[in-house]
Amino acid sequence: MKTINIGLIGYGTVGKGVYNIIYNNLNLYKKMGFKINIPYVCVNNLNKQRDFNKFTEWTQPIVTNNYNIITNNNNIDIVVEVMGGIETPLEIFNKTMKNNKYFVTANKNLIASNLEKIIDESIIRKKKIGIEACVAGGIPIIKTLQNNYLLDDINSITGIINGTTNYILTHMTKNNKKYLEILEEAQKKGFAELDPTSDIKGYDARAKLSILSYLAYGNIINENNIYTLGIDNISNEDLNYAKMLKCSIKHLAISKINKENELNNYVMPTLICNENILSSIDYEDNIINIDSKYNNNYKLIGKGAGMYPTGISVVNDILDIVTNSDKNIIIKKYRPKYEYNFKSCFMIRINITKNDIYNINDIIHTIENEFNNRKIIVSRLPYVKNESYDTIGYITTETHIKNLELLIKTLNNYIFYKDSNIFNVIKN
């Protein structure tokens, strides 16, 4: 019976999940006609106690902090990288390819920042790579795009693809909790990193979106060219406006073909009407909606992160390699023109510093005059008085995002301006 040897690089949350899932299915592999072993595990801290002795049907792996022992080992068939980062994992990938091995990763930052290089190299080497776990944890979005949409034309991909932001926004909306309070709770429960910047600022969702966009359209889009706005500036006033409009606030990643046949990618907080299924996806769950020429709207819902949702995607990639090792990722050559300056309807919330220079009517007139100067048509939301500042909101008709960026830049020059926030709006 054939034996597949795996070198596991990284034994954190995801690495432990991979190890457990593989071990718990040893009998299944035998029925499929092969065995799987993990003879080597690479970790950062050799002094940390591990739990390998509980896996009694396996010989305990050799634990090392030198990944070269895995990538250069002729007996290793598949290298699994779940350590995170970019530079070292890229070295691991290059050595894996050079030594004629297969590569599986859950590292979205590695893939997003080196998409074309990694896929092209794997095709040249005729070594399949597994990247399912890089986007949306346990949701099989990569395989779905590869298996179901190669002959279809995708109009848009819209998703909640970061569990941390969705967890926080759900609690802010449903339980009326403060942002920092929920973030601390999420960190304790393992739903947020100790440094949550990548999640909260939208960088995590942006990296995932660049991967999905590449698979859907064939475009390599620099992440800095994707409009990205996080959730760290969302206030109670924003939530109250959303409630008044019978909407929920969700952090969406969107890749779409616009009316001019251009590709737009953006990540930002979005007001979604409560009747839309996207508004019902709560806590750490993810959803991805694919709208296409032949398949209309197709939705995938599931856990977006965690030990076992991400771990099972890694293991499924391993099984795909073992059972169909010559089938690699296929990239469409559609490649529409990319346009950063996307159009949508928006909500803009403006906080106003209390002062004796302007009265309320003067402030409203000044703000709305700035909208008019940019030919932005708006509907005014209620003016809200707070203890130390006041708030006013507006809903725009369809306009370009750069118009709002320039508007805010101009408003920032007025003495009454305190801060603001922009929200995409999905009306149905």
Image (cartoon, rainbow, N blue to C red):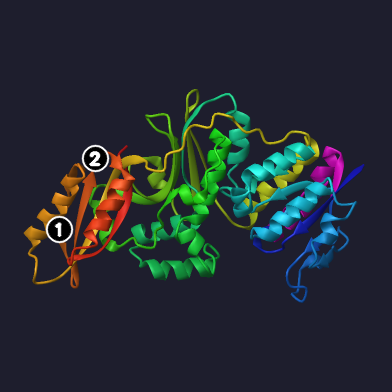
Image quarter in which the N terminus is found:
top right
Q: Quadrant of residue 274?
A: top left
Position above or below: 95 against 194: above
Label 2 sits on a secondary structure element that is loop
Left or right: 228, with 39 as reference point: left
Looking at the picture, which amino acid does disc 2 mark? Answer: Thr
The residue stretch that appears in magenta? 15-36
Please give the label number shown on residue 19.
none
Q: Residue at x 73, y 37 (%)?
A: 123
Q: Residue at x 75, y 55 (%)?
A: 92
Looking at the picture, which amino acid does disc 1 mark? Answer: Tyr
Residue lying furthest right: 1
State the residue in front, 191 or 425.
425
| Residue 232 pos. (x, y %) | 39, 63
Left or right: 382, with 49 as reference point: left
| Residue 91 pos. (x, y %) | 73, 56
24 is within the stretch colored magenta: yes
Please give the label number shown on residue 397.
2
